[in-house]
Amino acid sequence: MADDARMPDPDDPTAPRGESPTDDDGRPRRPVPDPLDRVWRHPSEMARSSPSRRFSRFAHRNLRRRRPPPRSDAERAARARLRNAVLVPVGSALAGAGVTLALLGAFGSVRFERSDANDTVSASTTPEPEAMVGRLAPSIVAVMATDTDGHRRGSGVALRHRGEIVTSARLVGAAATVTVLTVAGERLRADVIDLDAAADLALLDIHRPITAAPIATTGIGVGESVYAIGADPSGHATPWVTRGIIASTDGLVARTPGPQMAGLIVTDALVDTHAAGGALVDAKGGVLGILLSPVEGRREGLALPISFAAEITRRLRTNGDADHGWLGLHGIDTAEGPIVGEVIRHGPADRAGVRFGDLILSVDGRSVRSMAEVTAVVRRHWPREVVELRVRRGKSDLETFTITIGAARPAAADDTTPATSPDAAVPIAVGAGR
């Protein structure tokens, strides 16, 4: 054939360059790329390639990229200024935020709590101490009492808006009326509704409305921060405040005469005489307890839990008596511990089977060392509640009695005055914690 001319081989390096082959329909074809420029190559072609020129398609693409021209000194300086203008303020802000959170966490304004539900950490803000004290100030009053033993000054807390105030029974003493000084400077006469010497709590009434203190809505744990707030001894309107931590939630005081109560809140916050009857509050400003008057020989502060104090005030208002629990026995304090010296006939201990000569080891699982401690633990319960009394009978027999406790008897039949033993001293014991 006349036009059987041989078409140039696209892969033939000897084929003339600059000539564009044509398709079967006569249209010009695009120039065939060099084999090393192709994206995919057959393995047989790789064998013919030099090792120094074997590139992956990715490496080859990078090879074909053109490097940008070098920047001038002015361009580099401009980019550095822009980078500093953006990054430096952002970094400083982040660093400042971290320092702020650390300081707030250290001083109690932000508290980090771990959620039990999903084991995540969250931050809950708490009010600043100044703001918290400011909100409580209208509910904290100074209480001044005078009787044959002299003049005393302490604190009180308003728990009801209609004018009821709780304070320390030892502060009130035998006074029938006391003077109350509010944060606004008002001097008011308050009647003594009644008092509970065992819990060192007295209930007053000023017969006019007053701002009631908020009650804590959550429990408190050992090691948590608390504030002891009372009236300033100088008469200044700003309350007196100290800060500490919870050392125990089951403190015990057993004084004869004096308060005899278990289940007290113990704190290392300073509680002076003028703060007695004031409030122990949590970091959110909720009242956790009512501060007891300082106990001789005790350096720590003691507070009656607010739930127990509220029940005592209800009973004092309704019945005129706190009506604490009573076992119906007398005892002797010995070197081994308290021994039952008398069981009141038909009393709670008698009905349960307690006998003369039983050595009392524990009450409700708490070890006791004196009859005063036995009384303190029992008085933390109300009549018709159940306690367990563990005793040693004879030399080795151990007995556990389940006793439904009764109401406290008058002094003639009460178990607060232990019997004496001719050959054993009767110590006044003070315990704290289990």
Image (cartoon, helix red, strand yellow):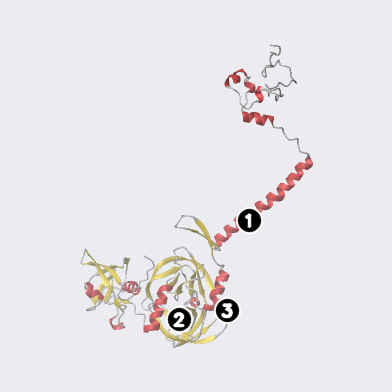
Q: Residues within 10 Å of mark 1 (few under 14, many from 20)?
A: few
Could you tell me the amino acid type at mark 2?
Leu
Q: Is residue 370 visible?
A: yes
Q: Specify which label sits upstream in the sequence, 1 or 3.
A: 1
Q: Residue 416: image x %, image y %?
A: 32, 78
Of marks 3 and 2, which one's residue comes earlier in the chain? 2
Image quadrant holding the N terminus, namely top right
Query: Which of the labelled discs sits on residue 171, or is there none?
Result: 2
Residue found at the far front of this picture: 1
Q: CA distance from mark 1 to mark 3?
A: 37 Å
Identified by mark 1, the residue type is: Gly
Separation of residues labelled 2 and 1 (CA atoms): 50 Å
Q: Which mark is residue 96?
A: 1
Q: Is residue 422 above or below residue 99?
A: below
Task: State how far apart marks 3 and 2 are (Cα).
Answer: 20 Å
**Circle 1 — which element?**
helix
Q: Position of residue 398 (x, y in %)?
A: 23, 64
Q: Which residue is mark 3?
A: 237
Q: Secondary structure at mark 2?
A: helix
- Closer-to-camera residue (186/43): 43
Q: Residue at x 64, y 22 (%)?
A: 52
Q: Are marks 2 and 1 in contact (CB under 8 Å)?
A: no
Mark 3 or 2: in front is: 3
Res. 412 image quadrant: bottom left
Which secondary structure lies at badge 3?
A: loop
| 115 sits to left or right of 261 | right
Question: How far from the left and from the top, in percent, is residue 30?
Answer: 70, 25
